[in-house]
Amino acid sequence: MEAAIILVFVMGYLAITIEHSIKIDKLIPALVMMAICWALIALGLESFPQWFDSANHALLEGFGSMGAEEKMHLMEETLLHHLGKTAEILVFLLGAMTIVEIIDYFDGFSTIKDFVKTKKKTKILWIFSILAFILSAIIDNLTATIVLISILQKIVKDRDVRLWYAGLIIIAANAGGAWSPIGDVTTTMLWIGKKVSTGHLIGYLFIPSLLCMAVPSFIASFLPIFKGELDVDEEKEEKKSKFSGTMLYLGLGAIVFVPIFKMITHLPPYVGMMLSLGVVAIFAEIYSSSKFSMSVHDAEESDAHAQHSPVHHSLSKIELPSILFFLGILMAVAALESLGILFGFAESLQEIMPMLGTEMHYSYEPNGGVSDLVILLLGVGSAVIDNVPLVAASLGMFHEPMDNELWHFIAYSAGTGGSMLIIGSAAGVVAMGMEKIDFFWYLKKISWLALIGFLVGAAAFMVTRTLF
């Protein structure tokens, strides 16, 4: 039965990886894979020799001698435990996405466009790279990419030039998301899973992530495509909501407040996110009663906005497919973890690496730990395979204590490694959709820059980790 569960997982994983070829949204195989894996566990429960206790991060003693009812009760408890942990992540993401949509409802991100005053290509490159790096740390790399490419489309009219900017935005957004607990789904998973703390995450990863963004941008600034100035059409400036700036700063401030709330109260992050969403929603409801008009052309849309709640409007625009995908993939990985499959794989990995002559790190035990090479390969793997299941698997495979450097290196590698392929990160996939970026164009033009940034940042991490 274990072989059948692994086969279902591998087939589902493959379907997720090649979703663009088979033209089936990745949430579908993720949900099917999750349901079938748990169904097979329920049907073959009595035949399994071991069970992994997720609460204590150890294999359960005496599982084989338990009765059928006791095993079924244990499976239900484990399923509920994993659902609770997954729900923490999903509710957190729902809150963050809603706040971002409320900001967009008030046209708040148009305020960022006002920062771009130059026509020089290299200066615009650095402005967008730095904005992507900072914004992705606050509102997550996926949302930052959507916002900045939307602004880019209004500033850079030449699509050939714009594709290069979009490629560098992907690299910068993924780098920025790696050092913030709310900047990337995988980092959020590690933070909510109590593997990393905010202070140590920033301390370990800020410099490596900054170099991962800055080095590719510096190299790109010498490329011919970024020489000279942009041809900018003088356009009549559109009117925007008088509350746009207020809602931008209020929304971003509310999201930044979440880690502070967690440190003060020690409550799970989703509680702070719900508080932040409530505060932003109060102001949104108050401001929306003014029945503002964003522009003459948007008068009809403005009237529609005035007739219903901005919170309801924002909730209707949330990326629900992404939420369901995370539910499917995290619960499917939980199925493998519960059977002790990931635990066994981790032990095998740790036995193999010394045989290959690889130096061992990340351990407080004499013979434990995982090599740097394994984590770097995980980063490369995240460019080919979605980084969410990779990090979810690592949570079940490794059992180092909170703030061990292993978890910070995983956060860096999984977060930034995806930049090496256009399909390797959520930021890349959304940019691919918005700009119709060709997979092989990105591979030829941008991937080498992303690889250099990834390796420079990884080298910087290996140096800076000695300071902690």
Image (spheres, helix red, strand yellow):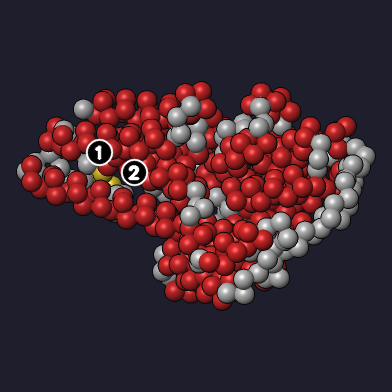
Q: Name the one closer to the observer, 366 or 339.
A: 339
* Residue 468, percent from left and from top: 59, 57
- Tell me if 214 is positioned left or right of 191 in this view: right
Task: Report whether 156 appears left or right of 136.
Answer: right
Residue at figure coordinates x 43%, y 63% from the top left: 270
Question: Residue 94, percent across and down?
Answer: 46, 57
Image marks 2 and 1: residues in contact by CB distance under 8 Å: yes
Q: Quadrant of residue 39?
A: top left
Q: Residues within 10 Å of mark 1 (few under 14, many from 20)?
A: many
Q: Mark 2 points at which residue?
A: 331
> Identity of the amino acid at label 1?
Trp
For the residue pair 58 and 287, the one nearer the viewer reads as 287
Residue 138: where, in percent of width, then height? 61, 59
Residue 372 placement, left or right of 448: left
Q: Residue at x 21, y 52 (%)?
A: 77
- Locate the N terminus by quadrant: top left
User: In terms of depth relative to the viewer, which is nearer, 217 or 148?
Assistant: 148
Please determine whether, in this image, residue 284 is positioned above or below residue 134: below
Instruction: Kindly identify which numbered label has been placed on residue 56.
Output: none
Q: Kindly identify the amino acid type of the residue bearing the numbered disc 2.
A: Met
Residue neighbourhood size for the residue with mark 2, other residues' Cα within 10 Å, grouped as few (<14), some (14–19), many (≥20): many
Q: Which structural element holds mark 1?
A: helix
Alpha carbon separation for disc pair 2 and 1: 9 Å
Going from N to C along the chain, the mark reached first, 2 or 1, is: 1
